[in-house]
Image (cartoon, grey):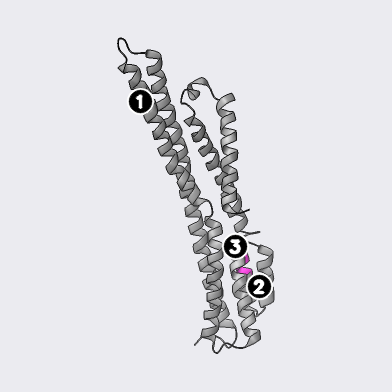
Amino acid sequence: MKQSVFITVVLVLALIISFVIFEYMMPQYIKDGGYLVIGLIAMTIMVVTFVFERMFSLRKAQGRGSLAVFLKNVTQEINRGNIDAAISSCDKQRGSCANILRTGLERYKMLVQEGDIKGQKEMMAEVQRAIEEAMMLEVPLLEKNLVALSTIATISVLWGLLGTVLGMIRAFQAMARAGSPDAVQLALGISEALVNTAGGLIGAITGILAYNFFTTKVDNFTYMIDEASYSIVQSLAEKFPGGKSK
């Protein structure tokens, strides 16, 4: 499913669920916040949805089994000169790191079979280029929906602020009436302002925490992939063919 379609589906479902929650499950003092609360509930639901989606996707990107053990096995196979076994290990691991390394190994194998690269240095440059191209395809998948989390966090604050302003307008209108102020309308206005403020802060805090957590996780994972790729390229340069690059 395309990212835009996924986000649209999540948005529509979140709005429907939020309306049901607002109408049938929320206490009256929350309903006093007005229909803007539906939007705040929807944004919170979207944040939770994206959090679970990112957790599932990043766990899948790590592949099967221990990544450290996988890298050790691939390096050992390369040192033995068994490129096919190293590629097979990547196929079994099925993570983002394995996909990237497999691209480099397959490129190296093809170059060795074709024999059209003059010199070890040129061959390793081709392998490194293939790995970098694979990285450019994998990293966006790891970062998917992070922008949505950041956007929701920002909009949630502004949405809550809008509800706060409308509530205060309602409260001041009650105070501005001739004679004694309308205590009921004054209380409703203040309640509307505070409920929207709280809802906006909840959505913003949740979104910011999730965004920072997953951004750090992706950065660490990307760094690990870079280190693994460099190690594999060095192993290839030292072992095949003719020893270390000149």
Image marks 3 and 1: residues in contact by CB distance under 8 Å: no
Pick whichever of labels 2 and 1 is earlier in the sequence: 2
User: What whole-number distance in Å separates the C-alpha atoms at marks 2 and 1?
Assistant: 68 Å
Pick whichever of labels 3 and 1 is earlier in the sequence: 3
Indicate which label's residue lies in the foreground, 3 or 1.
1
Is 2 placed left or right of 192 in the picture?
A: right
| Viewer-proximal residue among 26 and 106 | 26
Residue 109, given in percent of the width and then of the height, sits at 64, 80
Indicate which label's residue lies in the foreground, 2 or 3.
3
Residue 41, given in percent of the width and then of the height, sits at 52, 34
> Does the segment drawn in magenta span residue 96?
no
Q: Crowding near pointer 2: few (<14 within 10 Å), some, many (20+)? A: many
**Image point 57% across, 53% down: which residue?**
3
Residue 196 seen in render: yes
Residue 213, given in percent of the width and then of the height, sits at 48, 49
Amino acid, disc 3: Ser
Q: Quadrant of residue 196?
A: top left
Residue located beneath label 1 in the image: 169
Amino acid, disc 2: Ala
Is 19 placed left or right of 200 in the picture?
A: right
Residue located beneath label 2 in the image: 86
Is 190 placed left or right of 116 in the picture?
A: left
Task: Give the residues drawn in magenta, as a range.
Answer: 68-73
Residue 25 seen in render: no
**Image point 39% across, 28% down: which residue?**
166
Secondary element under disc 2, as helix, strand or loop, is helix
